[in-house]
Image (cartoon, rainbow, N blue to C red):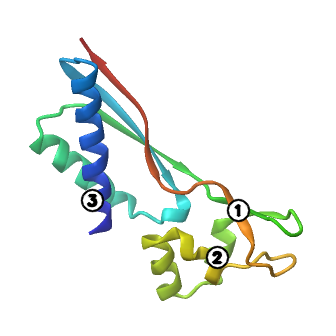
Amino acid sequence: MHEWSLAQAVIYTAIKYQNENKLKKITEISVKLGKLQQIDQKIFEFALHEIAQFKKIDAKIKIKIEDAILKCRVCNHVWNFRDALASLNDDEAELIHFVPEVSHIYIKCPKCKSPDFEIIKGRGVWVDSIKGVN
């Protein structure tokens, strides 16, 4: 599953950070999930904990969800991805889940109907911070 590979990347990033910074132990990993990615948070959290346990990392894992905000390059209208998601069918939403760049094919500005928009925030999955002890 997509969530498992993303969780693995987060844990491996934390391990790399631990090694580069010569930490004895990682105590906390903070992760941001952009809404545009449409990650199943329960599966992602489960995968994070399972992979962390397998890699012997006993850290608190914090997850913060970031709303996806879109801005039209034609008329400057700003809107929330959640509003656009309501107009998508299941197949279109799943395609955006795996390849967010295809959102321009399926989403249009609600004001001027242009597909030319930028994703201001809320795209992707990233490690926001890692804490540990020396």
Please provide percent x and percent y for residue 12. Answer: 24, 42
Identify the element where label 3 is drawn: helix
Mark 2 sits on what residue? 104
Q: Earlier in the sequence, mark 2 or mark 3?
A: 3
Query: Which residue is situated farthest in the top direction here?
Result: 134
Within-10-Å neighbours for mark 1: few <14, some 14–19, many 20+: some
Mark carried by residue 5: 3
Of tags 3 and 1, which is closer to the observer? 1
Please provide percent x and percent y for residue 36. Answer: 55, 64
**93 vs 22: above or below:** below
Tell me the CA gap for discs 2 and 3. 25 Å
The three-letter code of the residue at mark 1 reads Glu
Mark 1 sits on what residue? 118
Please provide percent x and percent y for residue 112. Answer: 87, 78
The three-letter code of the residue at mark 2 reads His
Residue at position x 44%, y 46% in the image: 126
